[in-house]
């Protein structure tokens, strides 16, 4: 289905990016107000703070709940910023609206649960506030879109998506893998849906926030949601991924915002070359699949299994090494040939089962 969307109408000094900033958690009234005042002085228009904090393990700070909502109301009254917080249950929605919260977002653990999303959609029936949906913790685009469809069917039309990266057992550079191809595909399928990036949760370290912000802008994202704290090293949660308002202001000042619609004759010629090369790739793949089907027929006649593990491992190893010599990531090349092999196996199974 297509989403029926209305503009978010969030205040911003620039067309792109609009920024939502504030601490991971609302810890104390003093901490919330100090951070908010500093951000407001830097020109921030949208303030965020977590009131209910779903933690991976028990024992961590899980937020003050309703006790902290008057602090956000005070931020709104004093600084004139809009205020935002995360909601995970219908009760959270009811309380957030009671205290005049302007913007709601739904976290990655909640968006992964269709039952929880339907309960939130029912609670938001007829409510006209901007609602952002973070990607599910697992890389499942359909689940992400489904979460937004549930809200949209309930009448929520001021919708946005937050890309916060995806959980992985093997954590190297990032806390959550960006997997940029997923939000890119989301934009291709729903071009009018605003998408903002959460560099704090993707990176997990404050030194990664600046390059991740720039990468999001280079990919045409509409905005950023960044964790900013008046004293990050003393934060009660996610201290390593928060920056001071001064540092955030500096990061934003360095961003290069490019116009995605500007084209020149030079780039059009290069794109024609890409189109021609893509056609050549398709021709080569067609020829490869033809040979694979012949191999499938041979395996059928000689009663051989379709999957030949040693041959498969040989292909991945050789092509990965070739890719590295050609300046490509071995992991990327392996992924390409895994997909090619999967299609080859599918076609050979069809032949064997005829």
Image (cartoon, rainbow, N blue to C red):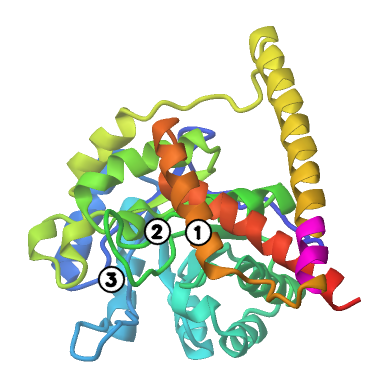
Rendered position, 262 above or below 56: above
Residue range corresponding to the magenta coloring = 294-300
Give residue 186's position: percent from left, percent from top: 65, 55
Seen from this angle, which residue lies furthest left?
234
- Identify the mark at residue 93; answer none if there is no mark: none
* Residue at point 51%, 46% (across, down): 333
Query: Foreground residue, 242 or 231?
Result: 242
Query: Foreground residue, 185 or 187?
Result: 185
335 relative to 327 in the view: left or right:
right
Q: Secondary structure at mark 3?
A: helix
Q: Dot 2 corresponds to which residue?
A: 177
The picture quadrant where one finds residue 276 is: top right
Q: Dot 3 corresponds to which residue?
A: 71
Q: How many marks?
A: 3
The picture quadrant where one finds residue 68 is: bottom left
* Residue at point 25%, 54% (across, down): 228
Seen from this angle, which residue lies furthest front?
302
Question: Nearer the viewer's eye, disc 1 or disc 3?
Answer: 1
Give residue 113's position: percent from left, percent from top: 56, 84
* Residue at point 32%, 77% (across, down): 51
Tags 1 and 2 touching, CB below 8 Å: no
Q: Dot 1 corresponds to which residue?
A: 162
């Amino acid at each position: 289905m297509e989403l029926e969307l209305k503009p978010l109408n969030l205040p911003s000094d620039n067309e792109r990016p609009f920024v939502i900033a504030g601490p991971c958690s609302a810890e104390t009234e003093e901490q919330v107000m100090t951070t908010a005042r500093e951000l407001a002085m830097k020109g921030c228009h949208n303030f965020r703070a977590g009131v209910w904090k779903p933690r991976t393990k028990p024992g961590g700070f899980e937020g003050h709940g309703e006790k902290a909502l008057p602090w956000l109301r005070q931020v709104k009254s004093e600084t004139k910023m809009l205020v935002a917080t995360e909601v995970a249950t219908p009760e959270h929605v009811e309380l957030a609206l009671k205290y005049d919260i302007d913007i709601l977002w739904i976290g990655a653990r909640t968006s992964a649960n269709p039952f929880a999303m339907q309960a939130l959609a029912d609670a938001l029936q007829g409510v006209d506030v901007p609602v952002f949906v973070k990607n599910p913790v697992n890389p499942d685009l359909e689940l992400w879109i489904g979460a937004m469809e549930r809200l949209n069917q309930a009448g929520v039309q001021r919708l946005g998506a937050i890309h916060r990266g995806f959980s992985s057992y093997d954590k190297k550079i990032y806390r959550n893998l960006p997997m940029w191809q997923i939000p890119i595909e989301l934009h291709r399928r729903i071009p009018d849906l605003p998408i903002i990036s959460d560099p704090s949760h993707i990176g997990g370290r404050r030194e990664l926030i600046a390059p991740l912000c720039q990468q999001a802008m280079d990919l045409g994202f509409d905005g950023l949601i960044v964790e900013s704290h008046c004293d990050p090293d003393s934060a009660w949660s996610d201290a390593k991924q928060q920056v001071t308002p001064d540092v955030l202001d500096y990061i934003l000042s360095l961003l290069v915002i490019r116009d995605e619609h500007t084209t020149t004759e030079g780039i059009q010629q290069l794109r024609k070359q890409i189109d021609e090369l893509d056609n050549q790739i398709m021709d080569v793949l067609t020829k490869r699949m033809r040979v694979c089907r012949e191999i499938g027929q041979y395996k059928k006649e000689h009663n051989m299994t379709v999957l030949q593990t040693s041959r498969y491992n040989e292909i991945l190893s050789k092509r990965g090494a070739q890719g590295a010599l050609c300046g490509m990531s071995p992991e990327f090349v392996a992924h390409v040939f895994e997909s090619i092999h999967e299609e080859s196996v599918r076609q050979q199974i069809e032949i064997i089962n005829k």
